[in-house]
Image (spheres, grey):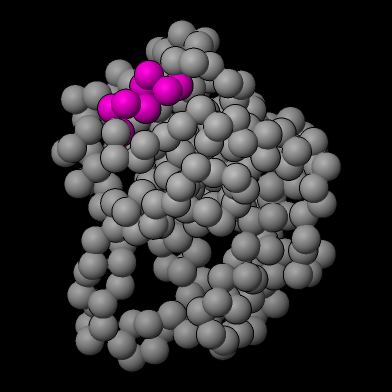
Amino acid sequence: MPSWAIHLAIATKLNKKLKFNNQDKNIFLLGNLLPDVLNGFLVENISHTVSHLETHFAVEVQICNHKEHRHDITGFYNKYHSKFSNPLILGYYSHIISDTFWNSTVYGTKGVLDEDKKVIGLKLKNGENFLAPRETLRKIKTNDFKIFSKYIYENNLADIPVYDEKMLEYAKDIDWLNLEKSDIQETIKYIEEMARLKKPLELECPDYQIFSQEEMQKIFDDCIEDIENKLN
């Protein structure tokens, strides 16, 4: 999954092409974070938690002899496409597409698979195949994302949402989330601190291990193109 900095930078780019007014462009930014807000992993003091599988419309798929969970982009579209004039929902959809694109790119181009097509390692930038448990691989991937996130924040490439009462009004269209005002405020507070680099990014390694800066930028650009194609 891409970091929130990446999600916001993607939303910032998309906002230049969407026909929303400025108020709704601001709300679209929050929508691009919304699937992660209530998972309980990033934002403290949220009102309640909702499982990652539920917020990301995950479905179980059979792959060879094992099962994995994948985001159901089509399922989300079928349920909510009639409400895509709601910028919060459109941002939510953008987030799910982004997650799917980045995961499939990372593990599809850099993953080392066993005969059952399970990810057992990653191809590192130095050419080495690094084999490790999935959680260790996730940390290496996340480290690359953090480095790219630092680049985004230092170069002011991500707009930060500001609180708007209309966010709660739009959130009623996703009533099963039961989003509260405090959840939105705590999310924005967290992002502001990260964007100002008040909270130092804790890196496992100071350098990219899987991708180069240029490769990360290409994935970023390709992801935006993928979202635009699906929105069209």
Of 119 and 200, nearer the camera is 200
Residue 113 vs 58, above or below: the answer is below
In the image, what residue occupies the spot 36% across and 49% down?
55
In the image, what residue occupies the spot 24% across and 42% down?
76
Q: Is residue 216 left or right of residue 61?
A: right
Q: Is residue 84 left or right of residue 143?
A: left
Magenta segment boundaries in residue numbering: 167-174
Residue 75 vs 196, above or below: the answer is below
Viewer can see residue 148: yes
Return the x and y of residue 215 as percentages of the image width and height: 61, 55
Of 165 and 114, nearer the camera is 165
> For the view shown, which residue lies furthest in the bottom direction?
115
Return the x and y of residue 185 as percentages of the image width and height: 60, 30
Residue 37 inside the magenta-drawn segment: no
Magenta-highlighted stretch: main secondary structure?
helix
Residue 171 inside the magenta-drawn segment: yes
> For the view shown, which residue lies furthest in the top direction?
21
